[in-house]
Image: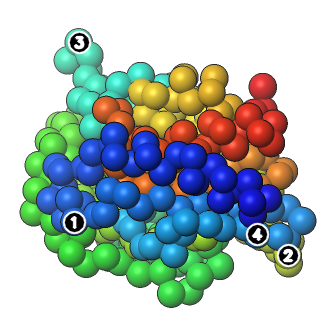
C-alpha cells in the first residue's frame, strides 16, 4: 500500500502546477503550489502515508460535515432537516441561492456556505465562542488529535475579506432563517473554516464516518450510525461542490474538499483518506488531489457503485 501511494503521488505530482491557489482569501496565497500529500487510515488499524502529508493547512469547507454532525448530535435529524435541506444546489460553494424572492430551508445545503452559516446557529452553546469551542473539540476528538487549533492569520484574513459570506448571512437574516447577530454567527463560521489540520487528521475524521460513528481501535461510539449515513449521503451528492457528479463517476466515494487544498474521503467500512494539495481546479477542488483519488479508486476498487 505504501508503495502504491508513493507511485500515485509521483505520477500526479506534475498536476500540482496546473492548479491555482485560492486568492479570494489573501492568506491562502501563501501556500506552496507543489505540495501533495496523502494519509490513509484503514479499518484493520493500519495507516499509510506519503508526500507532504505532514503539512498543515486550514480545513475550510471540510469543516462542514463536522458542523453538520454536531448539529445532528445537538438537535437530532428531524430538527436539522427542518432548518437546512439536503438537495444539491449544483452551484458554486458561495452561490446566492435565492429564487423568486423566497428563500426556504429546502434551498439550503449544509455543504455550501449558506447552509453552513445557518448550521452555526443550530449548535448548542451560551454564545458563539462556546459553540465554536465545542466544534473545535469535536474536530479534535474525531481526528484523535488534541493539538488541533485555529490558524489565527487565516481566520483574520477571512474575517477581513469575507464580504460574500456576509452577504449570504444577511440574506439568511432577511428571510428569517437566522435570528442572531450576523457578525456573531459569521465569526463562528470564519473560525470554523480556519481550523488547522493535516492529512492524518482528515484521514482519521473520514475513518470515523466510514466506520459509522465508531473510533478506530477502541471502537468507542461517538455518534449513532444513522448520523454517519446522513452525512455520508450528503457528501456523496454535494461534497465536491458542483463537481460532485463527476467525482461520483470517477472516484465514487463520499468526500469533502476545501479551498485550502484538503480533501477528506470516506470509503464506507474500509478507510478514511486525507489529501492535501493547494492548487485548485476551476470548481475549487484540489486538482492533483482528485487525480490521486481517481487512480487510487481504480487501483483499489474503492467506488461504492
Ligand atoms: N472559508 C471559505 C469560504 O467561506 C470556505 C470555502 C470552501 O472551502 O469551500 O469562502
Q: Residue furthest top?
A: 100
Q: Which disc, if any, is residue 30?
A: 1
Q: Look at discs 3 and 4 and give the one toward the viewer.
A: 4
Q: CA distance from mark 4 to mark 2?
A: 12 Å
**Would residue 295 be visible to someone looking at this image?**
yes
Q: Nearer the viewer, residue 186 or 236?
A: 236
Can you name the residue that lies furthest to the bottom here?
147
* Secondary structure under the numbered disc 3 in the rendered image: loop
Disc 1 versus disc 2: distance between alpha carbons? 37 Å
Q: CA distance from mark 4 to mark 1?
A: 29 Å
User: Residue drawn at (61%, 43%), measured in percent from left and top?
Assistant: 293
The image shows residue 141 at horizontal and vertical percentages of 62, 77
| Earlier residue among tags 3 and 1 | 1
Mark 4 touches mark 1? (CB < 8 Å): no
As drawn, the label of residue 47 is 4
Horizontal side, residue 78 vs residue 214: left or right: left
Residue at 27% from the left image edge and 45% from the top image edge: 20
Read off the residue under disc 3: 100
Q: Residues within 10 Å of mark 3 (few under 14, many from 20)?
A: few
Q: Of the two numbered discs 4 and 1 on the same chain, state the one appearing first in sequence.
A: 1
Query: In the rendering, at what x and y percent does residue 31 appear?
Result: 28, 64
Amino acid at each position: 500500500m505504501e508503495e502504491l501511494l508513493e507511485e500515485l503521488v509521483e505520477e500526479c505530482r506534475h498536476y500540482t502546477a496546473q492548479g491555482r491557489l485560492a486568492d479570494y482569501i489573501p492568506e491562502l496565497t501563501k501556500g506552496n503550489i507543489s505540495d501533495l500529500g496523502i494519509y490513509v487510515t484503514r479499518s484493520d488499524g493500519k495507516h499509510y502515508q506519503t508526500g507532504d502529508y505532514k503539512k498543515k493547512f486550514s480545513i475550510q469547507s471540510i469543516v462542514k460535515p463536522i458542523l453538520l454532525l454536531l448539529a445532528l448530535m445537538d438537535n437530532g435529524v428531524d430538527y436539522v432537516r427542518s432548518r437546512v435541506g439536503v438537495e444539491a444546489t449544483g452551484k458554486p460553494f458561495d452561490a446566492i441561492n435565492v429564487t423568486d424572492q423566497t428563500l426556504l430551508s429546502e434551498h439550503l445545503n449544509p455543504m455550501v456556505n449558506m447552509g453552513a452559516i445557518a448550521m452555526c446557529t443550530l449548535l448548542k452553546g451560551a454564545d458563539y465562542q462556546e459553540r465554536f469551542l465545542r466544534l473545535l473539540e469535536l474536530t479534535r476528538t474525531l481526528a484523535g488529535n488534541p493539538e488541533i487549533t485555529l490558524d489565527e492569520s487565516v481566520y483574520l484574513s477571512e474575517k477581513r475579506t469575507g464580504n460574500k459570506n456576509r452577504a449570504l448571512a444577511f440574506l439568511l437574516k432577511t428571510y428569517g432563517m437566522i435570528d442572531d447577530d450576523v457578525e456573531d454567527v459569521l465569526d463562528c463560521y470564519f473560525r470554523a473554516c480556519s481550523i488547522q489540520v493535516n492529512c492524518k487528521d482528515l484521514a482519521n475524521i473520514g475513518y470515523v464516518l466510514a466506520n459509522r460513528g465508531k473510533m478506530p481501535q477502541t471502537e468507542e461510539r461517538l455518534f449513532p450510525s444513522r448520523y454517519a449515513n446522513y452525512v455520508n449521503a450528503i457528501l456523496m451528492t454535494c461534497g465536491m461542490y458542483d463537481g460532485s457528479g463527476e467525482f461520483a463517476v470517477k472516484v465514487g466515494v463520499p468526500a469533502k474538499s476545501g479551498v485550502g487544498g484538503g480533501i477528506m474521503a470516506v470509503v464506507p467500512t474500509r478507510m478514511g483518506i486525507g489529501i492535501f494539495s493547494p492548487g485548485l481546479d476551476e470548481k475549487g477542488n484540489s486538482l492533483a488531489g482528485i487525480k490521486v483519488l481517481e487512480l487510487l479508486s481504480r487501483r483499489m476498487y474503492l467506488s461504492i457503485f
